């Protein structure tokens, strides 16, 4: 379940980043503070999600 949530978060934030920053290279385009904060938040969320996806599953010991 955690891997599914991580995958959805990665895809969702990549879509949001594309929608927010796709015009970044157009002349006269200005980045606002909320856009910067969205970018920073998306980097953190994507990094944590990738870390979760790459983590080895914990083995549970029978009791």
Image (cartoon, grey):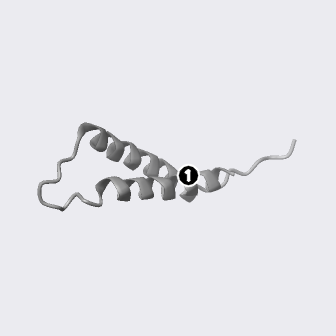
Q: Determine the residue positioned at 51% across, 51% down.
A: 49
Q: Nearer the viewer, residue 46 or 61?
A: 46
Left or right: 56, with 41 as reference point: right
Q: Determine the residue positioned at 64% across, 50% down.
A: 2
Q: Quadrant of the C terminus?
A: top right
Q: Determine the residue positioned at 54% across, 59% down.
A: 54
Q: Nearer the viewer, residue 38 or 29?
A: 29
Name the spot of residue 12 as percent of width and height, x first.
Answer: 49, 54
Q: Determine the residue positioned at 25% across, 59% down.
A: 23
> Which image quadrant is residue 33 in?
top left
Q: Residue furthest right?
A: 63
> Which image quadrant is residue 44 in?
top left
Q: Residue furthest front?
A: 28
Left or right: 2, with 48 as reference point: right
Q: Nearer the viewer, residue 20 or 46?
A: 20
Q: Is residue 9 above or below residue 38?
A: below
Name the spot of residue 45 as percent of width and height, x first.
Answer: 45, 46
Q: Secondary structure at mark 1?
A: helix
Task: Name the residue carrying label 1.
Answer: 52
Name the spot of residue 20 as percent of width and height, x first.
Answer: 33, 52
């Amino acid at each position: 379940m955690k891997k599914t949530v991580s995958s959805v978060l990665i895809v969702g934030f990549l879509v949001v980043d594309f929608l927010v920053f796709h015009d970044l290279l157009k002349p006269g385009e200005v980045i606002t503070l909320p856009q910067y904060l969205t970018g920073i938040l998306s980097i953190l969320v994507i990094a944590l999600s990738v870390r979760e996806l790459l983590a080895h599953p914990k083995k549970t010991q029978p009791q």
